[in-house]
Amino acid sequence: MSDTSIALNRIAPSQTTAMTDRAMTLREAGCDIISLSVGEPDFATPPHVVAAAKAALDAGDTKYTAVGGTARMKQAAALHFVRDLGIEVPTSQVTVSAGGKQAIFHALLATLDPGDEVLIPAPWWVSYPEIVRFAGATVVPLETTAGGGFRITADQLAAAITPRTRWLLLNSPGNPTGATYPAEELQALGEVLARHPRVLVMSDDIYAPLRYGEGAHATLAVERPDLAPRVLTISGVSKSHAMTGFRIGVAAGPHWLIAAMEKLQSHSSGNPSSISQAAAVAAFEGPQDFLIDWRERFRARRDLVVGAINAIPGLSAPVPDGAFYCMVDASPLMARFGDDEALALHLLDHGVAIVSASAFGGRDGFRISFAADEAKLKEALRRIAGAVA
Ligand SMILES: Cc1ncc(COP(=O)(O)O)c(C=O)c1O
C-alpha cells in the first residue's frame, strides 16, 4: 500500500532539478561547485520587463484575470507567434499558463487516456515522459543519434505510428541536444502525419529565439498548414527573455484543445500571475534587440564548450544548432565508470554539476548547459578534463 496515488507512483522527480538542488546543497556546505545543470539563461531579465512588473504592482494589477490570460496578454502572445514563429493565430486560439511546462501538462492531461501512445524523440526534455506516464498513457521513445543530428526521420516516424498513437512531441531547438529541424525535414514528417489524422503534434518551440544557424525558424504549423488544426505550438518567455521565475508560457492551437486546456487550468492554477502577464506583455511587445547580443554570447560559449569537449580524450560533442545545451558523448569512458550516472557523480566530486544523458532518455553521456559565463565555463571544462584524464 502506498500513501500516494497510482498516477503519482508512475512518475519520477525531475532529475535536472535534483542535480541542481544537489549542487546547491554542496555549495551551501562550502564546496566549490560550478553548476552547468540548470536550464535557464544566466542573463538578467531585461529592465523594461522588470519595470512593467513593478508598474503592474503599483497600479494594483494584483487580482484574478481570465483563466487563459488577459485580452492584452493574448494579443501579445499572438503577436509573438506571428512575428517570431510565423504562426498566424487569432487570440481565441491562444492560451497563457504558468510556464510552458503547465501548458504541456494541461494539453497532455486533457487528451490522453490509458492505452494511448505518445511518440517522444529521445534524448528528450525530462518532463515529457513523466507527464505522459502521469496521464496513464504509454511513452514510445524514438531513438536519435548524434550522427543523425539527434533528429527523427520520416521513416522512423512512419514505423512507430500505431492506431493507438495520440501525440508526437517535437522540440526544436531541442533540450537537451540543441537539435533543430530544418523546414524540409518537417515537411517530410508532415507527409507521414497527414496519413494519420488521429495523431496530434506538439511543437515545443520555446527555444526558437535562440538559434545559431542561418535562415528563419521552421515550425510544423507553418511548414504544413494542412496539419495546423492538430498542432499545438508551445512557446514562452522563460528562455528567450530570461524570465524563468515569472512563470509564463504560451500555446497556440485548435479551438477545442485551447478550450480543453483552459478548462483544466480553471481548476488547477486558475489564471497565470497578473503581474507576470504584465511583464510578459512588455517582453513580447517591447524591444527585442537585446536578443542579438544574447545569441552572439551564447554562440561564443557554445563554440568554446564544443571545442574544449572535443579536445578531451574520451569525450565528443556535435555542434548544437540552438538552445544552450550541448550533449556530450562519453561512451569510450563507460568501461571505466560503469554508467553515465556514475560519471555524473564523479564529475560532481571534481566540482562540476552536469546531468547524465540517461536522465533524458539518452545514454553514455551528459548534458552541459552553457548558460554560464565564460570564466566559469573555462574552469568547469578544465575540471572535467582533469576528472576524466
Ligand atoms: C523543452 C522545454 N520545454 C518547455 C520548458 C518549460 O519552460 P517554462 O515552464 O519555464 O516555460 C522547458 C524548460 O526547461 C524546456 O526545456
Image (cartoon, helix red, strand yellow):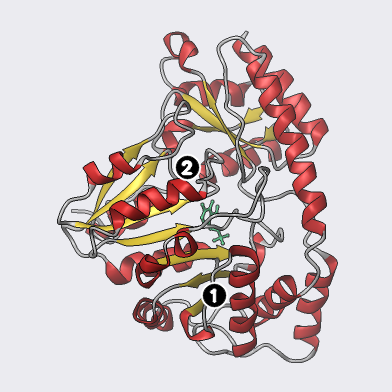
Of marks 2 and 1, which one's residue comes earlier in the chain? 2
At which x and y percent is residue 348? 60, 26
How many residues crowd around disc 2 within 10 Å: few (fewer than 14), some, or many (20 or more)?
Answer: some
Amino acid on which the number 2 mark rests in the picture? Gln
Q: Residue at x 63, y 8 (%)?
A: 389
Q: Residue at x 76, y 84 (%)?
A: 57
| Quarter of the render that holds ligand 1 | bottom right
Q: What residue sits right under mark 2 in the picture?
A: 15
Horizontally, is 346 left or right of 232 in the view? right
Q: Residue at x 44, y 37 (%)?
A: 359
| Picture quadrant where residue 322 is located | top right
Q: What residue sits right under mark 1 in the picture?
A: 88
Q: CA distance from mark 2 to mark 1?
A: 36 Å
Q: Secondary structure at mark 1?
A: loop
At which x and y percent is residue 213? 66, 43
Q: Residue at x 58, y 24 (%)?
A: 317
Q: Secondary structure at mark 2?
A: helix
